[in-house]
Amino acid sequence: MSLITIILCLLILCLLIYLIVYFKFGYVESDNYVCLVGKTALVTGGSSGLGYEIVLSLASRGCRVIIADKIIEESVKDGIISATDNNNIILEQIDFTSFKSIRNFCEKLKRSETKLDILINNVGIGKAPETPSEDGLNQTFQINYYGPFLLTHLLIDLLKKSDDARIVFTTSVASFMHKMTPASVTSNDIVIPQYRMFDYANAKFLTVVSSDIFANKLKKFNIACNTYHPGVARTTFFRNTRKNLNYASFTDLFAFAGISFLRIFVGVPPEKAIQACINLATSKKFKNTTGIFFGKYFPDLKPALSSDKNFCTKVWSASEKIVKLEHHEMI
């Protein structure tokens, strides 16, 4: 083995160690103790993983928390009440692969709630089954992007009634690896790139794009909207992703290897991974902050193409049509 090869291998090893350490310890630390008594929060995907930890953190501050998830179990509510002594926890069923389910949920919420102070769009999946949703869409895209896009629109009226409303979207550093191009979007459709292993990254990238537009459009209503990336957290997210992988596919095998590596060597406990979200949702420091992509990794950067106004406008327009927004529901 030549000296150059040895040096190259050592450099790669050092880089790998640096990345592991950086991602392992590069999470945001919460630095606020704001009381949330009198406030109401909605956390999607709040029955497990990051969502569950977000609910715990909000409930521990006295917040009234509504958990919206596909699978609702009383044991989840009991666990939160036991941990926080906060009885003001509500469970609501919603299926993000169904626009009808999202609409039914929002109609019910409008009847039961007078206002909404915090909306955490946390629901997500690394890879959903490849069969189309009941709306005929890619399920990974619908759960991660189209569903939250529709939900947020339908809850704007409740958010307007808060004096400090905040929307937080959970996204990912994977959004930097998206494969979307200007040609991927027309004014009527979003054409998903061919390789399914990038569905998650593409959907999370579009989340960043739409969050920025929400932020701009909602300023006049005193509603802040931001995205955060939690880093790599050791949650059920990885298990749920693995069960939908096709192990006869090379790309899925590659994804499985990557997922396993990240979970073992880079993953952090979920209670640490959510701190950026809690800061955005509660801290006085972020009261007038909107339109940022927050997290300790790459804090001043956003994914490529997210600043292309023409592209972003087409994404928004196509999304409105795909989720079938009525004229009065548009912002």
Image (spheres, rainbow, N blue to C red):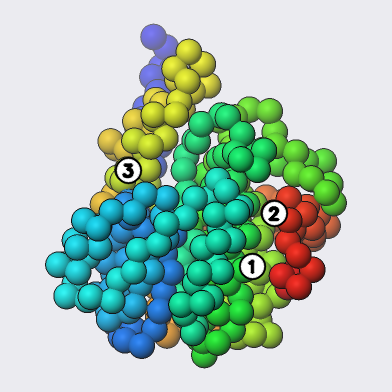
Rounded to the nearest angstrom, the CA distance separating label 2 from label 1 is 10 Å
Which residue is drawn at the image coordinates 25% and 63% (left, top)?
A: 77
Percent from the top left, x then y, of residue 118? 46, 75
Q: Is residue 40 above or below residue 256?
A: below
Most foreground residue, 280 or 176: 280
Label disc, if present, on residue 323 of the rendered structure: 2
Q: Secondary structure at mark 2?
A: loop
Most foreground residue, 71 or 22: 71
Image quadrant of residue 282?
Answer: bottom left
Q: Are marks 2 and 1 in contact (CB under 8 Å)?
A: yes
Kind of residue at disc 2: Val
Check disc 1 and report the residue beneath it: 153
Q: Are marks 3 and 2 in contact (CB under 8 Å)?
A: no
Percent from the top left, x then y, of residue 19? 39, 42
Which residue is drawn at the image coordinates 25% and 58% (left, top)?
A: 74
Q: Is residue 125 above or below residue 220?
A: above
**First in sequence: mark 3 vs mark 2:** 3
Rounded to the nearest angstrom, the CA distance separating label 3 from label 1 is 28 Å
Residue 5 in view of the camera: yes
Most foreground residue, 331 or 164: 331
Kind of residue at disc 3: Thr
